[in-house]
Image: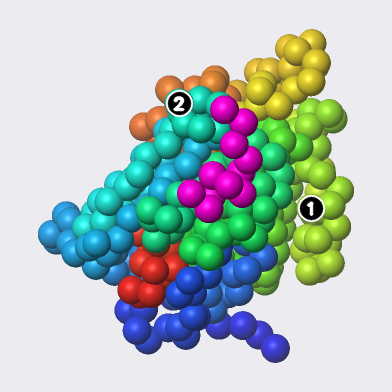
Amino acid sequence: MPTQPLNPHLPFGENKQADWYGKDILSVKQFSRDDLQYVFGVAHEMRGMVERVGTFDLLKGKILANLFYEPSTRTSSSFTAAMERLGGSVIPINEVKYSSVSKGESLPDTIRTLECYADVIVLRHPETGSAAIAAKAAKKPVINAGDGVGEHPTQALLDTFTIMEELGRLDNLTVTMLGDLKYGRTVHSLARLLSQFSGIKLNYVSPDILRMPKEVMDEVAAKGVPQAEFASLEKALPETDVLYVTRVQKERFEDPADYEKVKGAYVIDPKVMKAAKQEMAVMHPLPRVGEISPDFDDDPRAAYFRQMEYGLYVRMALLAMVLGKA
Ligand code: CP
């Protein structure tokens, strides 16, 4: 049966409301098209409120524990900003070495501790599956802010919101993912989330040792989405509507020599982008370390800085949803 295109501009009260109160957000697999419509509607309301009043009291009296075992700038600070813009407050644990984790405290015990003080926990951790372990230990909602090379669901939600804002649709798109597709958890989540839309084609451009994991490709294939792998961008770029660039994740390589072989494999700059459509978007979860030249930043197709701002509204929406205020 044909599905209705998403309309992010519907007020969220008119969208099908999912019951997210008290729920964990661990994987994009939890989100249907209707759920996305709902998240986007709430995010739009949040954007309007931030533009009109800046900060408001929707989550006044609520506390977020922001627990990061790995470095972060965007995810950590946007969750902090989201909570504070909603009138709540934050327990920031950005350096676990200064917490009792450095004394050997387990993840479940750390989670049980923080939920004594907070209403919701955002967790980034280097091990795949850690968010699910934390959620099992917790009675309060846990939001996965990246679990090793597993998933980064809130990033994929803000990525799809960005695509809607930039191109106005999530159906009938060719999305090309470029760079480190093996270790890049953002592309694992995004490929899974996009696979429920119609007319989607996914291109994967990477060095051989950084190809998209078979497990992700099999899940996407099961949804009937065509996928193609390339070693160079040349063939895929002209048909691309969204070019999703990723950093080669040096910190995940066991052998530094392997990193040296593939770092700098692809660089997006104005010359390369001459072969791309005029109406398309270049995205990146950031940080970048040379894979997009700053010379391209002023091009209207460069959406990666706007993408960061959209993340604030989406994370405001998610916090309000799991705390029963949306
Ligand atoms: N996109 C992203 O997860 O960025 P940070 O690592 O800075 O949070």
CB-based contact (under 8 Å), mark 1 and mark 2: no
User: Residue at point 14% right, 61% down?
Assistant: 52
The image shows residue 82 at horizontal and vertical percentages of 32, 52
User: Residue at point 32% right, 47% down?
Assistant: 90
Amino acid identity at mark 2: Tyr
Q: Is residue 247 among the parts visible in the rendering?
A: yes
Task: Report which residue position mark 2 lands on.
Answer: 98
User: Residue at point 70% right, 88% down?
Assistant: 1
User: Residue at point 82% right, 44% down?
Assistant: 213
Mark 2 CB in 8 Å range of ligand 1?
no
Task: Report which residue position mark 1 lands on.
Answer: 216
Magenta stretch? 103-113
Instruction: Work out how far the residue at label 1 is from the one at label 2, CA to CA, in angstroms.
Output: 36 Å
In the picture, measured across the screen, residue 282 lies left or right of residue 126, that is left
**Of the two numbered discs 1 and 2 in the rendering, the one whose residue sits closer to the viewer:** 2
Binning the other alpha carbons within 10 Å of mark 2 as few (below 14), some (14 to 19) or many (20 upward) gives: few
Q: Is residue 277 among the parts visible in the rendering?
A: no
In the picture, measured across the screen, residue 236 lies left or right of residue 167, that is right
